[in-house]
Image: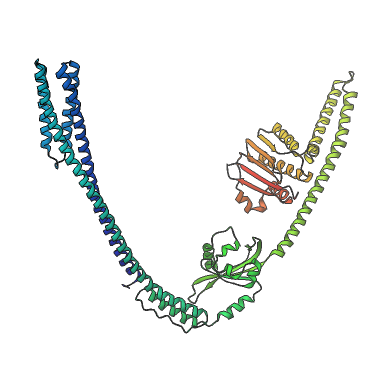
Amino acid sequence: MKNNIANKLFKGLTGMLIGNVLIALTGLVCILVLTNTSNNIVVEYIELEAVQELRISVNQIIAPAYDYIRYKEENNYAKYDSYLNNAYSNIDNCLSNLSHRHNKSLMIKIKQNLELFNKIVIEFSEHNFSQKVSNSFINEIDIIINEIHVDLQSILVETNAEIINHTVVYKTSSKHSIIAIIGFSIILLFIGYKWGLKFVQRINIPIRNLVKSTQMIANGNFTIRANVNTGDEIEELGISFNRMIEEIENLTVSRDYFDSIITGMFESLLVTNTDGEILTINNATCDLLSYSKSELINKNISVIIKDKESGFKLKASELIKYGAQHNKEKEYISKSGEIIPVLFSCSILKDRDDNFSGVIFIAHDLRESKKAEEKLSKIRKEHLIEINEAQEKERLRIASEIHDGLGQMLTAISYSIENNFTKKPKVEKEYTKHVVRLQTLIDNTIKESKIIAYDLIPILLKDFGLVTAVENLISEIQSKHSVKINFEAFNFTKRFDTRLEKALYRIIQEALNNIIKHSKASQSNIHIINHTDTVSVVIEDNGVGFDVKAESLRTEHKGIGLISMEERVSAFSGFINFNSAKNQGTEIIIDIPLKEN
């Protein structure tokens, strides 16, 4: 379409651009004229300054010349000679600075008179004249000086006249330049305003007709048709508008019927377009999220869905591939910010041509079922803690029996043998060997019983707390193995609950056992930090590491040690994370809330 809006706009903008170019050219011409005039003024001032300096230098030679003629003192002649050379230099400067508009012959005449003046002074210096002759020379010098002053004044008057003339030209040019630029600008603004007003009216009137027709259609009048004859894109818009009305009339299902179906649904339902913008929403969704329909229509669905997965368009492509998604747990965000768990299903919406046009979302509120699950989970955790506590009590009982019973009995046997047999000098050598061997076995048995008792339940943990027990555990390990273990505990001013201390001790013990048996590490760092609200444990080593993802995928093959660590942390509503990779060491991070424990 040749007569489209773009062409009209291009023609108008081209005309305005030409006008701007004309204004720019006018301004440029004015600037050139003003620049030339100002340059001429500057030149005249330079000439004026040169002439003034010459005039001053001429006046300077008169006094020492007279003094020399009268008194014939050498210092007067030296001063006169210096001033004379300065005058000659200023004459040369004036000749170089005076423009072609000035009469340079006057300046040559001044130079000649100055040479004649010097000739008279030199002639006088070479002869001894009477006072009367000296006065004659002075009179002659006065005549020459007067001629020089007259010529200089003539040049000054001429220069001042040119300065005044250039100043008048500059002011006149400035005035005419301002008038010309303002005039062109006003004319251009007027033409642009008239054209713009006409252009806007030619676009605005048919658009207003289309808006009026749209309002009538919104009120249910589908007989209206747009009549636009502009010969541009707006006419094409009118034709498309009329086709749209015909399509609406041919729909087989009315809007009211469709709305009644959606409104009557118990489950949350909403429909979006291909970009995720909400087109339709039912009352159940509004009640669930505490929004009104007007607050959600045309908003992106990401406003109400808490989702860390990929963007909507990528999900839409997955929907096109599979057709639908069923029973996925998601989370809605209500107007007040409440997180609402829902059972989520969605399917694609297609148009008449079987093309993807949107997505239908249906969600079921899971808050009640989640509360029931959390209650059961809490009961399971409490049971698990009670089981662990019962196990720890049994270990404590066994350890106490071994330590206080078996250990004490064996110690008594050792003392009895030592006192009753080893000190008798009459015992045969063979008998003594058996007694010593028996003593060694008994000592080993005592040590073994102590080791068993400590492994079952460390007495230091019971009596002195977690930090002391861990320090002793590390000391025992380092006495038997080459691995270097650095341990630090921060902000431990009081003890935790004994159950939590036992769990943390067993977790650290299991981690150290894994480092000794599997990691091949040469160094390990353990940090326990009390954050007031949580307790954090960080265990790291520089060993061979392992593939965390592979281990998590093969849960049934995961080591018993890792599982027991996870279960102990989970029993106290804590968080555990394993960071490791092949040949990059292992890091275990544990956070357990203290308020809940």
**Is 538 situated above or below 264?**
above
Tell whether 250 sits left or right of 342.
left
Q: Closest to the observer: 204 or 401?
A: 204
At 63% across and 72% down in the image, what residue appears?
Answer: 283
**Is 101 situated above or below 112?**
below
Find residue 183 and report its horizontal and vertical position in percent: 29, 60
Find residue 558 and report its horizontal and vertical position in percent: 66, 50
Q: Closest to the observer: 174 or 31?
A: 174
Find residue 535 and report its horizontal and vertical position in percent: 70, 44
Find residue 196 and report its horizontal and vertical position in percent: 35, 68
Image quadrant holding the N terminus, namely bottom left
Tell whether 67 sits left or right of 283.
left
Quadrant in the picture for residue 457: top right
**Is 559 situated above or below 470?**
below
At 73% across and 36% down in the image, what residue appears?
Answer: 473
> How many numbered marks are there?
0
Tell whether 278 sits left or right of 518.
left
Tell whether 224 sits left or right of 339.
left
Q: Closest to the observer: 317 or 510?
A: 317
At 58% across and 70% down in the image, what residue appears?
Answer: 294
At 68% across and 36% down in the image, what residue appears?
Answer: 488
Q: Closest to the observer: 446 or 120?
A: 120
